[in-house]
Image (tube, coloured by chain):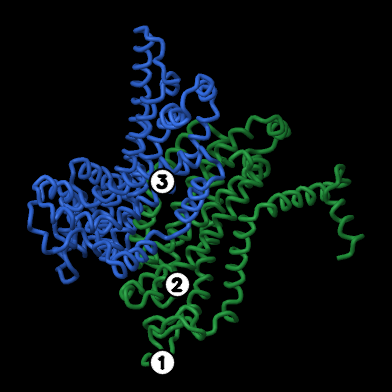
Amino acid sequence: MTATSPANAGGRWRALSGIGMKAGRLLATVAVTFLGLLLVTFLIGRVVPVDPVLAVVGDRASQSTYDAAYVALGLDKPLWRQFLIYLGNVLSGDFGTSLLTKRPIVEDIARVFPATLELATAGIVIGTVVGIPVGVLAAVRQGGLADQIVRILGLVGYSAPIFWLGLLGLLVFYAQLGWVAGPGRIDISYEYSFTQVTGLLLLDTAMQGEWAAFGNVMSHLALPAALLGYFSMAYISRMTRSFMLNELAQEYVITARVKGVPEWRIIWVHALRNAAVPLVTVVALSYAGLLEGSVLTETVFAWPGLGQYLTNSLQNADMNAVLGGTLVIGVIFVGLNLLSDLLYTMLDPRVRRR
Amino acid sequence: MSAAATPSRRDWLLADRPASPAQARLGQAYRTWLAFRANRLAMVGLAIVAALVGMALFADLIAPFDPLRGGDLRTARLLPPSWTHPMGTDDQARDIFSRVVHGSRLTLLVVTLVAVIATPIGLVIGTCAGYFGGWVDTVLMRVTDIFLAFPRLILALAFVAALGPGIENAVIAIAITSWPPYARLARAETLTIRDQDYIAAIRLQGASSPRIIWGHVVPLCLSSVIVRVTLDMAGIILTAAGLGFLGLGAQPPQPEWGAMIASGRRFLIDFWWVATMPGIAIFVVSLGFNLLGDGLRDVLDPKAAS
């Protein structure tokens, strides 16, 4: 399976142009999807019962100020013109101004995004590093201990509200046991002991050698990251199990056994390498899924990321910020889906040939 | 039980050669039930869901206290779990157990309404796309993909933000975000049904497209879509609870489980039961729907079982 395909130049060229065509078609699909995303957020913005003009000028403005703002916002134009203006604004990176922070939404999102990125990345690392081995063990010994664990983890992961587990985690590991730090990203005493360069606090503190601050960041990150990691692990381990079951039933496994390859090598090298191709897709998808989990998790842990920004804006009826945040999350979601599709095409020669 | 009557009824149901269509249909249902009953976890799920329905129906009889009006604010606030208050009381001196019992009505209401709204939308869009093909298919599936491009909770959040908080709007928002997978599924099923001979036969008899879709395609898609909806119920409950937790679902005096967790969050560390108890309810009910859905899938849709 892992052997290279017939290496004549023509075949390879055809395979490459196949990727090109597939990528082209994918890009066209993605363009349409982005347009649709924009249309959805635009339409949601139009059905809001809040008068966008009043939100800008305040309710004590004179009629002439109101009219001027009405025209300035482009509300006198037909709906399709408004959409085109919106489209142009978004494409040039202008999502409007937040009512709450009085700053451009793009700046706000750029400021809060690293916090979410750090949290989601830590989560996916935990989910992958734990989930894949557990899933492999579950497949190797069906009905064994690891298999039961995967089942139970999966059921709990699909049934428990993430915000409730987060609160329980805070109660037990922070309040009772004192193993981890509480809500927030960092203690206030460490906040200015280093300069923020990337916004990823683990990276910043490590690069500047501020190990006390690094430890503090770690201790804040541990619980929310473990929580998100748990939810992605539930999914990743389940999928690993079914991919591995599929691979272990293949003939090359029997061949390897007959040749006397040690069992651990068959499992962890031969079969896992083949299962890894669809697993890349699964990991990318669950990384995207963490965006959703981060909205509730960040609210529970007072984590100053995109999710908390979104819920704060929601509770203050800051519609521009809500739509900007929704759009950014939608774009990342589509991007990750696209990435997983492309990776799959690149890694699996069978898909490429089609 | 009487030894004579039971086996004969059983034999009638399991007859190899049913004498009437009704007998065949009942027999099939009975066989499905037998297969379902053999799955112990699925029966646990069924019991949980039945308990939820029973709790919602008889909430007034089961709940020992009023879910909205609390007791004496000086003496009955934030009491720990005890025999009179099995789940303790909250900061308004209300009995949490009674609130959880009444909250089952809201949960059931949300789940039912979402299923009733989202399933037909998904079925209509999916079967039309699959049956007509061509540009109808392209347009409808593009729209479906766009809705799938947002994470579900985020899109629901945006819709609730636009419509305003409240349980009705939460239901609408969740329904709007729930139908795309059903449409995908119904389309896939329709594609395999569309070119069958019996559809061609009906078409030759002059049946109109709506009639074919409604009378012959939809019924065949129904069972797999229903399995999918049941599997989704837990997700719907979790999304509704999440919206409630963020203050966008049911509004405060209402005993919605997610909102109850949010209100108990402020004093989590000193009075743990206020936020914990409603969470247990959400967890158990979601677990019930997941177990039931898994069991239904194994029985009704053996192909999909992993």
Give whichever of discs 2 and 1 has the lower sequence position: 1
Can residue A312 be seen by looking at this rendering? no
Give me the C-alpha separation between circle 1 and circle 3: 49 Å
SS of the residue at dot 3?
A: helix
Disc 2 vs disc 1: which is toward the camera? 2
Identity of the amino acid at label 1?
Asp
Disc 3 vs disc 2: which is toward the camera? 2
Percent x, y for residue A192? 7, 58
Percent x, y for residue A180? 26, 61
Crowd around label 3: few <14 · some 14–19 · many ≥20 (10 Å): many
Marks 3, 2 in one chain: yes
Give me the C-alpha separation between circle 2 and circle 1: 21 Å
Residue B277, labelled with which disc?
Answer: 2
Identity of the amino acid at label 3?
Phe
Give whichever of discs 1 and 3 has the lower sequence position: 1
Chain assigned blue: A
User: Height in image: A81 above or below B96?
Assistant: above
Foreground: B65 or B268?
Answer: B268
Give me the C-alpha separation between circle 3 and circle 2: 34 Å
Disc 1 vs disc 3: which is toward the camera? 1
| Residue bearing the label numbered 3 | B147
Chain letter of the residue beneath label 3 in the structure image: B
* Mark count: 3
Relative horizontal placement of residue A2, taking residue A139 as reference (left or right)? left
| Residue bearing the label numbered 1 | B72
Chain B color in figure: green
Chain letter of the residue beneath label 2 in the structure image: B
Percent x, y for residue A178? 27, 66
Could you tell me if the residues under marks 3 and 2 are in contact, i.e. CB atoms within 8 Å? no
Identity of the amino acid at label 2?
Met
Residue in the picture at 49% in, 34% down: A244
